[in-house]
């Protein structure tokens, strides 16, 4: 899993629509502010965020991701885009209003995932929304120790203190770029309350 050829993956996904969870949330998104996307891949959601007026920090360690995204960014949106070609766990996150990561955080090794998530929680402004897909333990890739998988208990811990808006669990046999697989995916949307809860 570690040595995936992401450039081939982007060629496979290029031209797609934004992912359904992204579309569902962005239909009700508030005033554009600072967004962060991790694992932006072919850049479809980053472009949609720019189009909606967000400032975007787009993070992906694969150089091919930036190569695919940059030529498609409208010139007037360029000042609102920062691309970081690095693993998410070493990136410094700015205070943010929206965090989106589609089918990417599972590719962080478990220890790095924990480091990253702590940084993410610290970067959330009051009212900020997290929109992510995470993979569950029944996913075909779960034996891969270089990837991160979560169950419902773990998710509860991850979103502790946040307002849970969506927690959908999907299990299905289907396709990945690498071939047939069993998908076990959690769609999660959570928001940092604007007022801290009473102690
Ligand atoms: C399955 S692709 C998903 C791409 C895109 N979000 C989509 O929905 O098509 C996973 C992406 O995660 C990126 N990725 C892998 N390890 C990462 C890490 N440690 N930090 C950030 N992104 C990572 C890969 O380079 C790849 O672009």
Image (cartoon, rainbow, N blue to C red):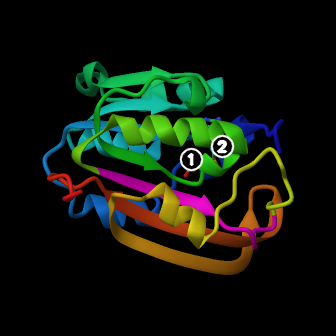
Q: In the displayed structure, would residue 35 be above or below residue 157?
A: above
User: Residue under circle 2?
Assistant: 11
Residue at image coords 66%, 43%: 11
Q: Which residue is mark 1?
A: 14
Is residue 82 depicted above or below 72 in this figure? above
Is disc 2 in contact with disc 1, using a CB cutoff of under 8 Å? yes
In the image, residue 127 above or below residue 40: below
Label 2 residue SS: helix
Quadrant in which residue 151 is drawn = bottom right
Whether residue 54 is visible to the viewer of this picture, yes or no, is yes
Please determine whether, in this image, residue 79 is positioned above or below residue 138: above
Q: CA distance from mark 2 to mark 1?
A: 5 Å
Q: Position of residue 145 (x, y in %)?
A: 83, 49
Where residue 183 sits: x, y (%)?
Answer: 70, 71
Which disc number belongs to residue 62? none
Q: Is mark 1 within 8 Å of ligand 1?
A: no
Residue at figure coordinates x 27%, y 25% from the top left: 80
Q: The residue tagged with tag 1: helix, strand or loop? A: loop
Please give the range of residues in magenta: 129-140
Q: Is residue 56 left or right of residue 195?
A: right
Q: Is residue 151 left or right of residue 92?
A: right
User: Which residue extends farthest top?
Assistant: 79
Is residue 89 within the magenta segment?
A: no
Residue in front for this viewpoint, 134 or 192: 192
Neighbours of disc 2 within 10 Å: few (<14), some (14-19), many (20+): few
């Amino acid at each position: 899993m570690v040595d995936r050829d992401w450039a081939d993956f982007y060629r496979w996904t290029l031209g797609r629509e934004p992912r359904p969870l992204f579309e569902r949330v962005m239909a009700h998104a508030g005033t554009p502010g600072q967004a962060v996307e991790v694992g932006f891949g072919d850049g479809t959601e980053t472009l949609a965020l720019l189009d909606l007026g967000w400032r975007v920090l787009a993070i992906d360690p694969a150089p091919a991701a930036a190569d695919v995204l940059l030529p498609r960014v409208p010139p007037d949106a360029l000042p609102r885009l920062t691309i970081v070609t690095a693993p998410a766990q070493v990136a410094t996150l700015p205070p943010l209003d929206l965090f989106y990561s589609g089918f990417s955080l599972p590719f962080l090794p478990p220890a790095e995932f924990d480091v990253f998530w702590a940084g993410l929680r610290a970067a959330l402004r009051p009212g900020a929304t997290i929109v992510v897909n995470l993979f569950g333990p029944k996913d075909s890739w779960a034996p891969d120790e270089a990837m991160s998988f979560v169950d419902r208990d773990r998710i509860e811990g991850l979103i502790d203190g946040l307002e849970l808006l969506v927690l959908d669990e999907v299990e299905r046999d289907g396709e990945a770029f690498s071939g047939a697989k069993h998908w076990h995916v959690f769609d999660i949307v959570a928001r940092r309350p604007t007022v801290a809860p009473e102690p």
